[in-house]
Image (cartoon, rainbow, N blue to C red):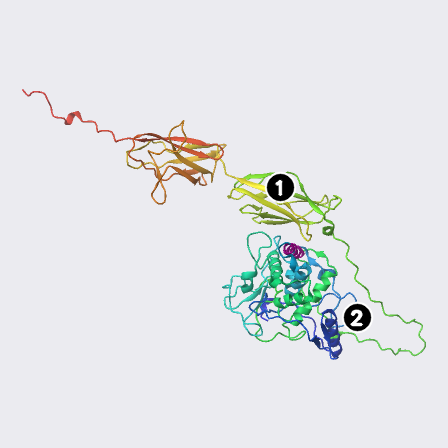
Amino acid sequence: MVAHFDRRLRKAAVTTTVAAVVVAALSASQAPDVTADGNGRQTTADNAPTSDTSSEESATGNSPYYTDLPPLKSPLPSPTTGTPSSRGASEAGIPATVLDAYKQAESELRRTKPGCNLPWQLLAAIGKVESGQARGGRVDAGGTTIGRIIGPQLDGNGFALIKDTDNGVYDGNSRYDNAVGPMQFIPSTWAWAGRDGNGDGKEDPNNVYDAALAAGHYLCRNGWDLSDQADLDRAILSYNNSQDYLNTVLSWLEHYRRGTHEIPDGTGTLPVGRSDDTHAGASPSPGRTGAHPGSRTPGATTPSPSPSPSPSQTKPPASNKPDNPGPSTKPPTDPAPPTENPTPSPTPTDTVHHLEKTGTTAFTAVAGDTFAQRIGARAETKAGKAVGKVRIRFTVLGDTDATFTGGDKFAAVTTDASGVAVAPALVAGEQTGAFTVRATVIGRTVPGLDYKATVTERVADALASTGGTELTCTPGGEFADPVEVKATLKGAVADKVAVTATLIKSDADPAENDKGPYFKDADGKTVRTLTGLKTDAKGLLKLPKLYADDTEGTYVLRLTTAGGAQLDLTLKVAKAAEPTPDPSSEPSTEPQA
């Protein structure tokens, strides 16, 4: 693989026949429907399921995947160099946001496709095999991966041949497609399978909520019932058409069904084994290019694990023959009995039964301003006891440009000792109207809380004309001087304030006039009311040119704003005054002498 894929070190090579047999036997013991022959080779049952899904129609394009098997609870025989070993808690756990995405997807599919019976553990198994749970949970508060996860280019050289279908939008490759994101969708499949799982109005394969929901819908197509083993096998094989892939996913599915736990985002570990490795420790086949599903973005650094000792470095077992013949005074030691990993204690998140609103429930701000009140939620047990150290996600939903401080529509906050999490301050955008902020527990499927927020128009309490000349025009002509006004609020400049201009009948009658001065719209038609006008950064507004019909008279132009500001301007339409005769130029009527 080329250098920019930043791969982690592979496991040490298996150099003895005994170790190879152990690896095969352990792998077979954890993969359903797989057996190993006397030489350690894996064989599958005659009735092994198959898939007729083509590479172009599969989720991943049959891209490479991680082959590591679940942690062993009772490793027998004891692990040696090159064999699987029991993993730490971080490897067995699932990052909080990633776990939440899987559970949210399961909940949505229960509602929309109840006959599918999709378990979230299946999504977790596929997510583990495809990207190591989004590279150990390296995601932001909204669930988007920190850096893109890109698979090898599918150029037919050791992989399927799938030419570019997205113009490089998702994978950055305009020649061939690559699998993308935590669930490793190829762009051609994402085009019809993509979903918006986090409610931000976008379908992003790099977002674990979107990708998990898309994977759920993908696995639930064709009327499959995933509680049926045959349908489950078909669905998994359609994701990646490989018998070994099926066995690996089923192994992780069974592992997660037995129980798992939440770990902090970014603390998970990446698997090591890869399906595109020719064998452990060997280089991949020539011509295979592209980033691994778990690779970091170019330039990122990945700490290397401590290398496993080579066989030459491994201390040989001690001989049974004592150095000094004679009766032994040391009693024989029985081998230690197998130990089971204890069931993890419930995390604080596991104890949350519901959320409660705290503080105010009315949130209103003027466009462009910061909301004075902040949104808070309290995590409680069923008995109403506060639960601290629980992560709450706040999400801005709806047609709005309001965001949290910093410009994000998501925020993740940990509850304090009183069980309360307070969202960052909300900042109103320029779009007015109501929207929703939803609070949910990350890693726990309990009903969320919805908070209503409203953005109102910018206001001004005063309008003043900046012009000092009288606004006059002759019948059928144009007003020479433009109308310009300035808006203020409590004496300060009121910028971006909406202004309505209406030519009314009189001070006492605010109805729109049907004669006299008028504006023109884009088509040159007569209009006497203008909306959508806004003051600039200095609070100034210059109106479009005014025209007059043939009706003489005195008219009123009324300008109003939200906040109560009003200004009436007088317009006069009259014929030009007759020129006054110059007495010196008139002929004399006096008789001449």
* For residue 513, side relative to residue 382 (left or right): left
Determine the secondary structure under disc 1. Answer: loop
Question: What is the quadrant of residue 530 in the picture?
Answer: top left
For residue 67: magenta?
no
Left or right of residue 530: residue 318:
right
| Label 1, residues with CA under 10 Å away: few <14, some 14-19, many ≥20 | some
Q: Position of residue 409 (x, y in %)?
A: 58, 49
Nearer to us in this view, 442 or 190: 190
Label 2 crowd (10 A; few <14 / some 14-19 / many >=20): few
Magenta part of the protein: which range? 98-110
First reached walking from the N terminus: tag 2 or tag 1: 2
Which of the labelled discs sits on residue 250, or is there none? none
Which of the 4 quarters of the picture holds residue 2? Answer: bottom right
Task: Decide: is 307 above or below 102.
Answer: below
Q: Which residue is drawn at 25% across and 31% down?
A: 576
Counting the numbered discs, the total is 2
Identify the residue position indicated by label 1 in the image: 374
Magenta portion: prevailing SS class: helix
Q: Distance between the residues labelled 2 and 1?
A: 55 Å
Residue 114 x %, y %: 65, 57
Q: Position of residue 344 (x, y in %)?
A: 77, 57
Q: Are marks 2 and 1 in contact (CB under 8 Å)?
A: no
Q: Where is residue 266 in the image (x, y as percent from the top left)?
A: 66, 57
Instruction: Check disc 2 and report its element: helix, strand or loop.
Output: loop
- Residue 350 in view: yes
Residue at 47% across / 38% down in the picture?
497
Which residue lies under the disc numbered 2?
76
Determine which quarter of the picture holds residue 270. Answer: bottom right
Amino acid, disc 2: Leu
Q: What residue type is labelled 1?
A: Arg
